[in-house]
């Protein structure tokens, strides 16, 4: 029996799983509360386990042959219809996701949710226009072909859950795979809304499924299932290691984006005001952005001038209700996460690191945390070396390019980097020396869907984006035909 739909501030949302084209309830639930007001319970959400994981994977297995047999053009029609429905419902999805994970509603409405539609359209088109590589050698004509890999498990994080889910599921579906999506338990509702649109778009049962619940329960069951042939995960390195072990046991390729500790390099020749304004953007979404440049590395000659500009830019932030247009800084996702962020700052203070500004919870009732800048005693400080994932940045100085590169590459992470300089030759040099999957020069968070995305070190394994994603979700084979073979 399905659980009745819940009213989330005027928007109807199902709290149940979506398996084989139907809503499926569980005997257990978990609470989903709003970071905007922790007393506000949004829903009791179905809490899946091994049983629900088995049902979803079985549905994906059963649906796979027919979905894989469709042409890219036919699969693309489903994805395009889904994209149209997302565009139609952007405001509803944005409102629910704002309540569920507290990202600014205006940002979700104008920028983030619509990208979900663009993801489906982009991968549908990439699959349609794929040109196989062909060549002749050793008396044979050779062609590289893509084969759909099989049932795919996608596990997504609690920040920007709708967009990040579409970013992974779109290429998997376009490549001919069936999908089981498991959203994070702290913000599951917008992904449930996606399943309503999947149903409305007429996807065949079992092609696109959703199971909800705790990672240690349903997530672990999904990634350890031997019927699964691809796994894609975004989250912490700790969880990534566990998923990697499960994937290895079944020899399943998996890709993981595991966060970052990006350097933000500011050289003396940079437009310091522009750099300071962009550095203040690192506090957006409560600093809960894996790509953020959280380690400010500033040339020593402009340290004081930059800090003054940066503090002034930070003071322009307005902490408040994420539904209000005046708000620029949202609360953190969960009380546990607030405690984690505050723990980093507390330990930094105890270690002797200098808190240049911020460093406190705004109050003891809400989940807001002050924008914080820490000047560490040394590069070995925990606050420098570990991802905080909150509105906490560090400040260090360098004397020359070689020291800047050494500091930038001194953590185990390597997801992204930001460089501010007016010297194009320097930008080219540093761009080749920095160890990061994406490097922005005099800009930030400009994404091209055809570009590879991923990290080095403990920031992850594999690449997403463009043909890189479609190749991951496919098995490649080479067809060799002896020259002179005649058509029958």
Image: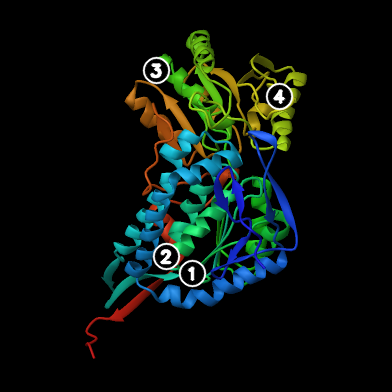
Question: Badges 1 and 2: C-beta atoms under 8 Å apart?
Answer: yes
Specify the quadrant that holds the N terminus. Answer: bottom right
Residue 185 appears left or right of 443: right
Label 2 belongs to which residue? 175
Residue 108 visible from this viewpoint: yes
How packed is label 2: few (under 14 Cα within 10 Å), some, or many (20 or more)? many
Among the two numbered marks 1 and 4 on one chain, the one whose residue lies closer to the N terminus: 1
Q: Residue at x 38, y 57 (%)?
A: 123
Q: Residue at x 57, y 53 (%)?
A: 13
Q: How is the image coloured?
A: rainbow
Q: Secondary structure at mark 1?
A: loop
Among the two numbered marks 1 and 2 on one chain, the one whose residue lies closer to the N terminus: 1
Label 4 belongs to which residue? 345
Residue 242 appears left or right of 420: right
CA distance separating discs 1 and 4 = 45 Å
Label 3 belongs to which residue? 270
Question: Badges 4 and 2: C-beta atoms under 8 Å apart?
Answer: no
Q: Residue at x 38, y 16 (%)?
A: 271
CA distance separating discs 1 and 3 = 47 Å
Label 1 belongs to which residue? 149
CA distance separating discs 1 and 2 = 8 Å
| Image spot of residue 159 (x, y percent) | 57, 42
Q: For marks 1 and 2, give the one nearer the viewer.
A: 2
């Amino acid at each position: 029996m399905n659980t009745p739909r819940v009213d989330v501030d005027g928007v109807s949302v199902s709290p149940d799983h979506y398996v084989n084209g139907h809503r499926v309830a569980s005997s257990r639930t978990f609470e989903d509360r709003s970071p905007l007001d922790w007393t506000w319970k949004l829903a009791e959400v179905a809490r899946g386990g091994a049983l629900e994981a088995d049902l979803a994977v079985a549905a994906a297995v059963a649906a796979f042959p027919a979905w894989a047999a469709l042409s890219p053009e036919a699969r693309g029609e489903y994805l395009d219809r889904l994209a149209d429905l997302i565009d139609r419902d952007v405001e509803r999805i944005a409102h629910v996701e704002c309540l569920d994970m507290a990202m600014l509603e205006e940002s979700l409405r104008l920028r983030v949710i619509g990208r979900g539609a663009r993801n489906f359209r982009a991968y549908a088109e990439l699959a349609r226009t794929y040109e196989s590589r062909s060549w002749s050698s050793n008396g044979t004509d050779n062609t590289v072909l893509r084969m759909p890999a099989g049932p795919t498990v996608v596990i997504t994080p609690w920040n920007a859950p709708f967009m990040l889910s579409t970013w992974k599921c779109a290429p998997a579906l376009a490549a001919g795979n069936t999908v089981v999506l498991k959203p994070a338990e702290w913000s599951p509702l917008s992904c449930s809304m996606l399943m309503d649109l999947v149903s409305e778009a007429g996807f065949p049962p079992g092609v696109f499924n959703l199971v909800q619940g705790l990672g240690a329960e349903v997530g672990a069951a999904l990634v350890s299932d031997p019927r699964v042939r691809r796994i894609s995960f975004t989250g912490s390195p700790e969880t990534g290691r566990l998923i990697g072990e499960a994937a290895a046991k079944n020899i399943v390729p998996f890709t993981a984006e595991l966060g970052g500790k990006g350097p933000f390099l500011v050289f003396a020749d940079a437009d310091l005001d522009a750099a300071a304004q962009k550095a203040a953007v690192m506090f957006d979404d409560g600093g809960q952005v894996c790509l953020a440049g959280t380690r400010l590395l500033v040339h020593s000659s402009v340290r004081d001038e930059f800090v003054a500009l940066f503090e002034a830019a930070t003071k322009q932030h307005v902490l408040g209700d994420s539904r209000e247009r005046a708000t620029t800084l949202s609360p953190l996702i969960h009380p546990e996460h607030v405690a984690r962020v505050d723990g980093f700052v507390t330990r930094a203070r105890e270690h002797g690191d200098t808190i240049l500004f911020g460093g406190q919870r705004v109050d003891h009732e809400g989940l807001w945390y002050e924008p914080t800048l820490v000047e560490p005693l040394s590069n070995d400080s925990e606050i420098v070396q570990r991802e905080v994932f909150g509105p906490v940045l560090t400040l260090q100085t360098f004397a020359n390019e070689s020291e800047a590169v050494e500091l930038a590459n001194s953590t185990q992470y390597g997801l992204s980097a930001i460089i501010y300089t007016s010297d194009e030759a320097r930008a080219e040099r540093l761009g080749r020396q920095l160890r990061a999957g994406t490097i922005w020069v005099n800009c930030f968070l400009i994404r091209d869907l055809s570009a590879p995305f991923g990290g080095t070190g403990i920031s992850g394994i594999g690449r997403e984006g463009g043909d890189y994603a479609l190749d991951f979700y496919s098995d490649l084979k080479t067809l060799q035909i002896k020259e002179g073979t005649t058509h029958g």
